C-alpha cells in the first residue's frame, strides 16, 4: 500500500472501454510524517476521494482490480485508491488529518 495525498484529477477523453466512468486521480506519495516522498502517479478511485484527501493506494494490478471491483479481469488497472485516511495512531501519538 502507498500512503499518498490526492493532488489532482485526471480527465481523459479517450480511454479503455473498461474504464468508462472511472474517476482517475493524481497522487503524491508521502512518508510516515506526511512529507512528499517520490514521484506522483495516477490511480483509479474506488472510494470517492477528493483533492487534498490522504489515501491508501494499492499498486498491484490484480489486487487493484479486485479493490475497484472491475467487471472484466483484463481491465487495465495498475493502481487504485482503496481507502481514505482520517487518523494515524503511532507510538509518537495520534496524528489527526482533519480537525
Image: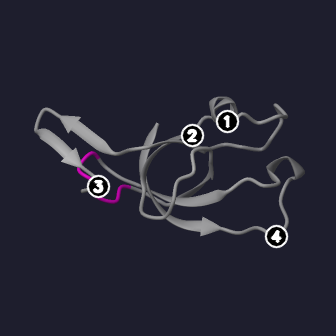
Q: Circle 3 sits on which residue?
A: 98
Q: Circle 2 sits on which residue?
A: 59
- Of tags 3 and 1, which is closer to the observer? 3
Q: Secondary structure at mark 2?
A: loop
Residue 35 in the magenta stretch? The answer is yes
Q: Residue at x 42, y 63 (%)?
A: 52
| Quadrant of image for the C terminus | bottom left
- Of tags 3 and 4, which is closer to the observer? 3
Query: At which x and y percent is residue 51?
Result: 48, 64
- Of tags 4 and 1, which is closer to the observer? 4
Q: CA distance from mark 3 to mark 4?
A: 33 Å
Q: Is residue 83 above or below residue 26?
A: above
In this view, the residue in front, 2 or 21, is 21
Image: magenta residue range: 32-37
Q: Report the side of 71 relative to 85 (left or right).
A: right
How packed mark 1 is, by other alpha carbons closer than 10 Å (few <14, some 14-19, many 20 or more), is some
Query: At which x and y percent is residue 28?
Result: 45, 59
Q: Which mark is residue 13?
A: 4
- Of tags 4 and 2, which is closer to the observer? 4
The mark nearer the N terminus, 3 or 1, is: 1
The mark nearer the N terminus, 4 or 1, is: 4
Q: Circle 1 sits on which residue?
A: 61
Q: Secondary structure at mark 4?
A: loop
How packed mark 4 is, by other alpha carbons closer than 10 Å (few <14, some 14-19, many 20 or more), is few
Query: At which x and y percent is residue 58?
Result: 54, 38
Q: CA distance from mark 1 to mark 2?
A: 6 Å
Residue at the outermost right position: 17
How packed mark 2 is, by other alpha carbons closer than 10 Å (few <14, some 14-19, many 20 or more), is some
Amino acid at each position: 500500500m502507498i500512503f499518498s495525498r490526492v493532488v489532482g484529477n485526471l480527465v481523459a477523453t479517450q480511454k479503455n472501454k473498461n474504464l468508462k466512468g472511472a474517476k482517475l486521480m493524481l497522487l503524491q506519495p508521502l512518508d510516515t510524517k506526511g512529507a512528499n516522498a517520490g514521484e506522483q502517479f495516477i490511480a483509479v478511485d474506488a472510494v470517492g476521494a477528493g483533492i487534498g484527501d490522504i489515501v491508501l493506494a494499492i499498486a498491484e494490478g490484480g489486487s487493484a482490480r479486485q479493490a475497484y471491483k472491475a467487471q472484466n479481469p483484463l481491465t487495465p488497472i495498475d493502481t487504485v485508491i482503496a481507502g481514505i485516511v482520517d487518523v494515524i495512531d503511532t507510538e509518537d501519538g495520534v496524528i489527526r488529518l482533519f480537525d
